[in-house]
Amino acid sequence: MKNEVVIKRIGIAMGAALILAACQTVSMPKLDFIKTPEFSVDAANIDKSYPRVAEAPEAPTDVRTAEQWDQDVRTIQALRDAPRPDGVEEGFTTADDQLRYEALKAKVHAYKADDPASGPVQGFPDYRPRR
């Protein structure tokens, strides 16, 4: 039993070594897409007016100050905490939903009553809309 475990470990180690050796011998070709004919026109027309790294500022100059951040946060908090504007309707109650359901069911019955192919609808079981 002990010899089988040792043999398996040696086999796994040798397999791993062979896989690593095989991966090391693979050489990838060096591809330069700029020199291909598809990109030759674009490569010739590259804008050379990019700024140099040495010309870049060490710190950004367009960052808001801490006071400006605080002022903006207070403005957002005031908008959040403001009372709701007038004219906002509340949601439907369960009774309103039931009334709307009954009105729509009556429309369906009226439509089906005029349809000669299906005739009137036989009826619905007592339906309670889910909330």
Image (tube, rainbow, N blue to C red):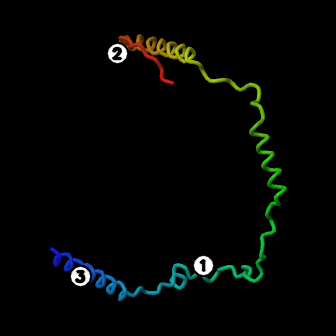
Which residue lies under the disc numbered 2?
118
* Residue at mark 1 to residue at mark 2: CA–CA distance: 68 Å
Q: Residues within 10 Å of mark 1 (few under 14, many from 20)?
A: few
Of the numbered discs 1 and 2, the one sitting upstream in the chain is 1
In the rendered image, the vertical position of residue 21 relative to residue 93, given as above or below = below
Task: Name which residue lies at 52% across and 79% down.
Answer: 38
Q: Quadrant of residue 126?
A: top left
Q: Amino acid at mark 1?
A: Asp
Of the numbered discs 3 and 1, the one sitting upstream in the chain is 3
In the rendered image, the vertical position of residue 70 relative to residue 86, given as above or below = below
Q: Amino acid at mark 3?
A: Ile
Label at residue 42: 1
Q: Amino acid at mark 2?
A: Ser
State if disc 1 and disc 3 touch (CB < 8 Å).
no
Q: Residues within 10 Å of mark 3 (few under 14, many from 20)?
A: few
Closest to the observer: 83 or 92? 83
- Quadrant the N terminus occupies: bottom left
Of the numbered discs 2 and 3, the one sitting upstream in the chain is 3
Judging from the image, what secondary structure is the residue with disc 2 in?
loop
Query: Disc 2 vs disc 3: which is toward the camera?
Result: 3
Which residue lies under the disc numbered 3?
10
Judging from the image, what secondary structure is the residue with disc 3 in?
helix
* Residue at mark 2 to residue at mark 3: CA–CA distance: 79 Å
